[in-house]
Amino acid sequence: MGFYAEMALEESVSGGDYSCSLPVIHTRGRKKMGTRIEGFVKKIFEKSGRSARGAWTAHSFKIESAQGEEDKYFYQLGFNNPPKFDEGDFISFEYEDKDDTARTFIKGTGNKPAPPEKEAPPAKNYKGAATVKSSELFGDIGGYNTEDDIRRMSYSSCRGDAISVVGLLLANDALPMSGAKAKAGQAKRFAEINAMVDKLTVEYFFDAASGRKIDIIQDGGTVDVKADIDLPDSDESAPPAPTPADNDPDAIPPEEEDGSF
């Protein structure tokens, strides 16, 4: 039986011209039913004090999932009821809700099942959000940056470069501009300069994100050139050195790569 009742007639209610006895129901042995949960014990807390009834010690703990996500609730074991588990143990137990921050551990419901394999927790940025691991625009992102962080930093850098280039073009009279000196002409030149800065900013931003210029512009460093010094004969057992071109006597040939660092 889940519980039993004891009928007692010792307590009575009297009043006026009558009296009657009321039954008293004792529910000894009744088992509490709660919600079952499981997780790794992240931290055990202990608090001690003294009251009119003597010294007391209270324990509570927090748990986390196999993915490292911490449960927001404190699970309270009550007074003078030390935990039968350690930090890092994987436990399963039942609880009853108490308030928005705490739940009550139901004594006698705990056990230690086989633990699941722990997973690495997601990285967090300085805002507390999970770090973006991969981006279609910027590729792999690590550390404490998100894709938004990388986007802002890249855009800011590209805009600074665009302003520098526009300034260089204006200083060398290489940027066609409206020549009118009136107010309308000044306003038009202001709009033209800002439009050019915006255009170059966006161009440089996507150049940096995609690397597209690397695929369409030839690397001048790949052209073979002739050295202006005499090179020693190579070892016959070594692979032959590339033959330099004869049309550039002032250039230095590229160094051979041997895999060292």
Image (cartoon, rainbow, N blue to C red):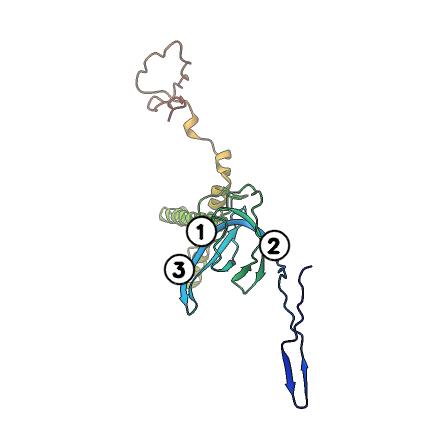
Left or right: residue 159 compared with residue 97: left
Residue 93 locus on image (x, y percent): 58, 53
Residue 36: numbered disc: 2
**Mark 3 and mark 1 residues within 8 Å of each other at the beta carbon:** no
Q: Nearer the viewer, mark 3 or mark 2?
A: 2
Name the kind of residue labelled 3 in the image: Lys
- Real-space Cα separation, disc 2 to disc 1, in angstroms: 61 Å
| Extreme residue in the left direction | 229
Determine the secondary structure under disc 2.
strand
**Badge 3 is on which residue?**
181
Q: Nearer the viewer, mark 2 or mark 1?
A: 2
Query: Which of the marked residues, 2 or 1, is nearer the chain's N terminus?
Result: 2
Residue 258 locus on image (x, y percent): 40, 21
Q: Which residue is painted at 42% across and 58% down in the image?
A: 180
- Real-space Cα separation, disc 3 to disc 2, in angstroms: 80 Å
**Mark 2 and mark 1 residues within 8 Å of each other at the beta carbon:** no
Q: Is residue 14 above or below residue 214?
A: below
Determine the secondary structure under disc 3.
loop
Quadrant in the picture for residue 228: top left
Name the kind of residue labelled 1 in the image: Val
Query: Which of the marked residues, 3 or 2, is nearer the chain's N terminus?
Result: 2
- Real-space Cα separation, disc 3 to disc 1, in angstroms: 22 Å
Nearer to me, 86 or 202: 86
Nearer to me, 125 or 249: 125
**Badge 1 is on which residue?**
197
Neighbor class of circle 2 (other Cα within 10 Å; few <14, some 14-19, many 20+) is some
Name the kind of residue labelled 2 in the image: Arg
Nearer to me, 43 or 234: 43
Residue 215 locus on image (x, y percent): 51, 34
Q: Which corner quadrant holds the N terminus?
A: bottom right
